[in-house]
Amino acid sequence: MILFALSFLLILVFMFYQRYFIFALMLFFALFDMFDGFYKDEKVFAAIRYAVPLSLTVVYIFRYNVLRSRDQLLLLLFVYLLILLIYTPGDLVLSAKITTSIILTLLMIPIGRQLGAEIDFAKAFERFNRFLLIAIPVYVISANVFHFGESYSDDFSTGFLITSRMYLAPIVIFLAVHYVITNKENSLLLKLVDMAFILINICLIIIVTRRTSMGMLAVSLAVYTLFNRQLFFRMALMLVILGAALVFSYPLYEQRLNAQLEQRERIQNIDTYEEEGRYLETLFLMDFLENRARTTQVLFGDRPFDTLRFGNWYFGYDRAIHSDINMILYSTGVVGLLLFAAVFFRYFVAGIGGIPPEDKKLYYPLLLMFLIVLLPGRFIGTLTFAPLLMLLLSSAKYHTAEEELPEPEPEPTPSNEQAYYNSYLPKRTTI
């Protein structure tokens, strides 16, 4: 089976090519979500999705001494979530899955910090990003040819990359634009190929009509342009070319786009936004906290990340809370919300002024992507893109913090490699 093969390959990479493990893990999450819909969500597949990556990641963290004393706040959050999982009643399986995905995602922060201090992670990720840039449209086209997956209409499907899973696309597109603009080593042919697939992916985002995806891409590119004024002409030229290509290629995707818009007519009418589920759930959550919740539920939450009961109370059916902020407040209470906010401030706000200008060009667009996702939600529990986003953010913020990291233990091989990532990319330091 494909899922077993992906897990086996991930384990092989961990055992024999450990310097590539984190890169392979990002591909594993994306590819797994492309094919998991073919199989029933049985316990064995849940173990593959969550237990295997978490186990390997924990071993990796201890092997390379990733955690620091400054990570105590992050560990405190993990302990708090595990205590809630054990002592708060609810759907244990659902709560355990989402809690595990949160831990996996947030563990990418200290890992990204270490990688950012040793290599230029964004540059190192280019070949893997190109793989995703090509894989996403190939997969979506295959889904429409062979008719698998889910969609808003019968005219277009994104396979099993549904809803928030497609948030991977704007991240991949943004990185691809960055590489085309800044990487002078790539040939003209390779850049043209990249631009072609950037165009295809943008078309897919437009057809899917996910407002969050379009907002992530538009805001990130706008901020990136502001921070790259010396490359403004290149950026403007590239956007003009892509815009013209979108206009001329419109007849190719017009029918599918119109079919999608017919099914999602409400997003075209601003008067219906007061009926938007995410808006209503915020009002309902305030009502729950003020009128229905006990003091313990206000402080520590109700059923960690199992919000279907809330949906039944207020919407009349099993609707999970969508907004991540609402989800955190309902599931972990005020205490949990404060812990999450403290972790965010500690890693992504504190010391932000010390980020070098070159790294700010990537950091701020990525940070805004993260904030955009938090409001409509689905960052929590979505491994397709969330770990990658945390990894990119952390590695960009801590890119020049070599002095904070001790020397990693040498690889247990006869050659006793001199560096953790030697023969891989030009490093900022020699360890």
Image (cartoon, rainbow, N blue to C red):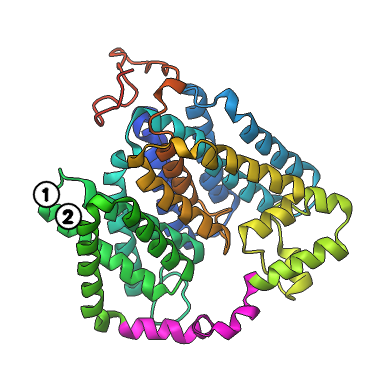
304 sits left or right of 179 in the view: right
Residue at the image point whose x is 71% and y is 57% from the top: 306
* Rendering coords of residue 190 (x, y %): 15, 53
CB contact under 8 Å: marks 1 and 2: yes
**Quadrant in the picture for residue 72:** top right
Residue 260 visible in this rendered orientation of the protein: yes
The kind of secondary structure element at disc 2 is: helix
Residue 191 numbered tag:
2
Q: SS class of the residue under badge 1?
A: loop
- How many badges with numbers are in the image? 2
In depth, the one of 11 and 354 nearer the eye is 354
Quarter containing the C terminus: top left
Q: In this view, does 291 lie above or below 41?
A: below
Residue 110: x %, y % from top left: 50, 33
Label 1: few (<14), some (14–19) or many (≥20) C-alpha neighbours in 10 Å: few
Which stretch is magenta? 254-278
Q: Residue at x 76, y 51 (%)?
A: 333
According to the picture, the residue beneath numbered tag 1 turns out to be 187
Q: Is residue 9 visible?
A: no
